[in-house]
Amino acid sequence: MTTADLSGNPRRYVRFTVFYNARAYYPVLAILFLDLGLTLDQFVLLNLIWAATIFLFEVPSGALADTIGRRKLLITASVLMIIEMLCLLFAPQNGGAALMALCVINRICSGLSEACASGADEAIAYDSLPENDRENAWDHLLATAMRWRSVGFVIAMILGGLLYDPAIVNRLLPEQFHLSKEIAHRLPVAIVLCQAIVCFFTTLRMIEPPRAATDDIRRACQNAIRLTWKTASWVFTNPKTLVVVVIGLAIDSIVRNFATINSSYYRLIDIPEWTFGFIGSALGVLGWFVPTLAKKLNDRFSTLTNLGIAAAVALIGLTALIPAWRFFGLLPAMLLMTTMGFLGFTISRALHREADSSQRATVLSVKGLAFNLGYGLFSLGFSRLLASFPSQPVGSALQSALFWQVPAFALVTIILFAWAGILKKQHS
């Protein structure tokens, strides 16, 4: 295989990562499922299925990518993305068991697709770059991909939020072509279906770089699982990495759960649906400044102190959500969302510092697996909490659940930081 044969892969990687990740339904994800006829606790439970699917297939998919090829895994990811969108596009509104079944298939396909695409897209792009200057070329390609992905997110967020609101859509259409609310609510999904088709044809045109690989899929999976288990043992017996992962998991689970249901909260505080995309875009702009602040704080304070800052900010944000102030409730919501960026920077920096280069990628995989498991378990608990409160008046169950998660999070946080302090003294 010549260099010329692979020269198109980096460009196709950028196109794939933009269309795969910048999904137009993101700003309305929770209310999309609710308007189909699910309850909020059912939607949160679906996120447990999604997280569990990624948790179970993340490691085997990596072994498959190295065995049968990254291109095949990316094609599979694109096909699964098409299937998950078709499930939502044709799901019957208020369809009872049929609706729930299609939503479950959607979440499983989504999780499998994420697991297949995870790492395979970057791997095929990296291996397609010229060997003599690969590191510099990769830095340039990654920066290009991040810039285009940011542009894609801004466009997708604004477009998804606007199209979901039938009043906005119908203002642009002649009266005889006005859309019903039910059809307008499917428009962001239809756009993502088109994105999935672009991903499919993009991956078909990719070329697999030559590499040393075994044809024994079972052995590759066994080796991957064995390496992950060995690394996980190290992560959870090394006091420094143990504290970072466990405390980070506790904060990430509750904040990420809110990030998943934020559109439902926006509806609770009377934020117009057409603005959801603009809110997502504003958060993207704020995200540009978070790494700078995170670096300064991490340079000045210890990792444990920065985790304490993240926990304190999260607790303040979660507490301020409870009154569900009309419009002003948006401020704590945005505070929580930006906390995720700060937390991610702190955890990533700490793990990179502790991990040896030979195990760094696997350490990050273990962290990802643990965080997905933690998020899934929290989603299960939150869904049970929602189900325990009356659904009327509208929004009362969500507001009650938001209230009770605060003392639970505060208690867990106090216990974990006390434990971390004791562990630090024991190993100092």
Image: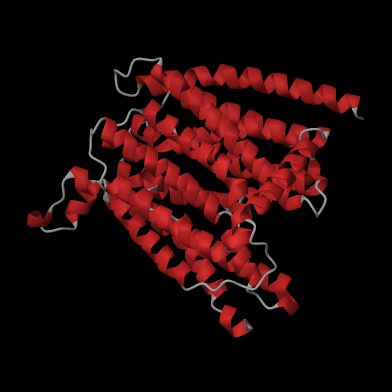
Is 54 or 239 nearer to us in this picture? 54
| Residue 368 position by quadrant | top right
The answer to whether residue 271 is visible is no
Residue at image coords 35%, 39%: 103
Q: Height in image: 14 above or below 55? A: below
The N terminus: image quadrant: bottom right
On screen, residue 54 versus residue 260, left or right, reads right
Residue at image coords 47%, 35%: 49
Q: Residue furthest right?
A: 428
Residue at image coords 38%, 28%: 42
- Colouring convention used in this rendered image of the protein: secondary structure
On screen, residue 400 versus residue 272, left or right, reads right
Q: Height in image: 312 above or below 179? A: above
Is 427 or 329 nearer to us in this picture? 427
Is 176 or 65 nearer to us in this picture? 65
Q: How far from the left and from the top, in percent, is residue 51?
A: 52, 38
Q: How far from the left and from the top, in percent, is residue 144?
A: 57, 68
Q: Height in image: 41 above or below 194? A: above
| Numbered label tally | 0
On screen, residue 23 versus residue 125, left or right, reads left
Q: How far from the left and from the top, in percent, is residue 162?
A: 30, 51
Q: How far from the left and from the top, in percent, is residue 428?
A: 92, 30
Residue at image coords 56%, 45%: 57
| Residue 181 position by quadrant | top left
The answer to whether residue 255 is visible is yes
